[in-house]
Amino acid sequence: MSKDHNNLYLYLISLVLFAGCGFYHSKIAEPSQAEIKARSASYSKICESVIYPNCVSCHNQAQASGGVILDTYAAVKANLGEVENDALIEKTMPPKGPLSSGDQKILRSWITRGAPQYEVSAPDPNAPVPSPTPALQLKATYASIRELVLVPKCLNCHGVGGKAYAKVPFENYEQLMKGNTIRKGDPENSTFYSQMELGKMPTKKSGLAKVSPADLQIISQWISIGASP
């Protein structure tokens, strides 16, 4: 084969390879509007597409079917484990039939991204990096324990309207001091502390993280020194 034929042969192979690359890149489809919407969905969009049309009529402050309330962001976040299980895994909710594939995609993406309350826009690469905000540290006071433990981990069930409120209410300090819930000076025999120490509360079904050992130590300290209001 002559040198010219060799060059022609190499040229044709190059054209095929470049065409193949172009074909490959053309196959990498840009995300659809539905996918972009799913990736950027905020709580307000989840409410508009999923929660309000399918859930709130039964799961509200007045009705609370199954003891589950879904009419506020805090309530939805507290029941996120049940929402994910019933709507996306077992698909038993809503009762009228499973969510559409589009609504399932939006809900799954929102949960995967940590269930943000607000839409998060793409970060500006030129923006200065903000200093991290220090996390609130639990203190051995009722106010701190209510804000950082009771409200996010307990009151959805043990607060007004919750399924456990009638038997074991935690809505205020006076209720928390009744019976064996808090035995001042005796954390081990205080069910509020012991159930969390054993890992039974919050329940696995709630989808909430357990109370950390460090926070348990603070709660134990608060009870030991008299559990003052």
Image (tube, rainbow, N blue to C red):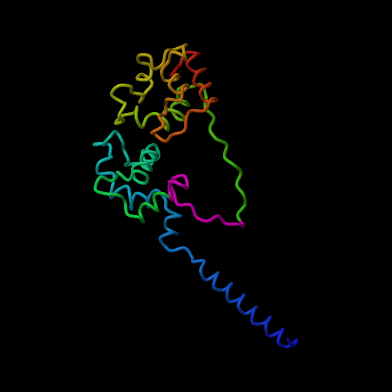
Outermost front residue? 1
Residue that appears at 55% across and 25% down: 214
Residue that appears at 39% across and 34% down: 206
Magenta: main secondary structure equals loop
The image quadrant that residue 102 belongs to is: bottom left
Q: Nearer the viewer, residue 184 or 168?
A: 168
Q: Quadrant of the C terminus?
A: top left
Residue 34: x, y in percent?
40, 60
Q: Which residues are magenta?
A: 109-126
- Side of 25 relative to 90 (left or right): right
Query: How many numbered discs sit on the rendered protein?
Result: 0
Residue 151: x, y in percent?
41, 31
- Side of 10 relative to 208 (left or right): right
Q: Is residue 49 magenta?
A: no
In the rendered view, tell whether residue 172 sits above or below residue 57. Answer: above
Q: Quadrant of the N terminus?
A: bottom right
Outermost top residue? 185
- Side of 13 relative to 35 (left or right): right
- Side of 176 relative to 210 (left or right): left
Q: Is residue 111 magenta?
A: yes
In the rendered view, tell whether residue 196 sits above or below residue 92. Answer: above
Residue 177: x, y in percent?
38, 16
Residue 160: x, y in percent?
31, 29
Residue that appears at 33% across and 50% down: 50
In the rendered view, tell whether residue 15 sits above or below residue 152. Answer: below
